[in-house]
Amino acid sequence: MQQTLVLLKPDALERGLVGEIISRLEGRGLKIVAMKIIWVDEALAKRHYAVHESKPFFEGLVEFITSRPIIAAVFEGEDAVAVVRNAMGDTDPARAAPGTIRGDLAQDIGRNLVHGSDSEETAEEEIKLFFYQKEIFNYSEEID
Ligand code: IDP
Ligand code: MG
């Protein structure tokens, strides 16, 4: 079992696509184990996107993700990281395949609706940035 961080970016909420995106991820067999709506501050945005610090789009990215509320979630399942990445499609919606969230629903690389961790290691770090352990539901402990 793997866990991965999913962010529904401000454009997902603005465009009323939250249900559709969650539904697509659940449809791939993933379970929601944590979810909340939050307004990301600049410090969190910069930590989350630290790997892109030197990129020309960094400032705009931080500005966008902090502009309005987002939904942060942890999805769990077998190969959850890869399953989410495949469901999301390419970073650039113009290159994202039909059938993917970005390929079907997004038009702009800077407004691509969703974030998903890109490796198991990144997922662990990113989940810790957004959630306390006690906020993440543990099915195996609670249900037998
Ligand atoms: P990912 O979200 O598919 O993992 P990353 O390369 O990690 O893509 O980039 C993080 C986010 O930064 C992207 O989702 C996108 O919103 C934004 N981004 C990436 N490349 C560009 C670009 O060339 N122009 C504008 N925004 C970009
Ligand atoms: Mg990324």
Image (cartoon, helix red, strand yellow):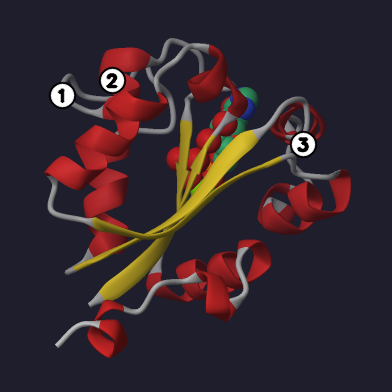
Does residue 122 appear to the left or right of 96 in the view shown? right
Q: In the rendered view, would you say 79 is above or below 28?
A: below
Distance between the alpha carbons at the discs numbered 1 and 2? 6 Å
Q: Which residue is mark 2?
A: 103
Does residue 111 appear to the left or right of 100 in the view shown? right
Q: Which residue is mark 1?
A: 99
Crowd around label 2: few <14 · some 14–19 · many ≥20 (10 Å): many
Does residue 139 appear to the left or right of 28 in the view shown? right
Q: Quadrant of the N terminus?
A: bottom left
- Residue 23 at x, y percent in the picture: 23, 35
Residue at position x 29%, y 73% in the image: 2
Give me the disc on residue 33.
none
Distance between the alpha carbons at the discs numbered 3 and 1? 28 Å
Q: Which residue is mark 3?
A: 62
Q: Amino acid at mark 2?
A: Gly
Q: Amino acid at mark 3?
A: Val
State which quadrant residue 143 falls in: bottom left
Residue at position x 55%, y 79% in the image: 134
Q: Quadrant of the C terminus?
A: bottom left
Callouts 3 and 1 close, C-beta under 8 Å: no
Numbered disc 1: secondary structure: loop
Residue at position x 69%, y 50% in the image: 49
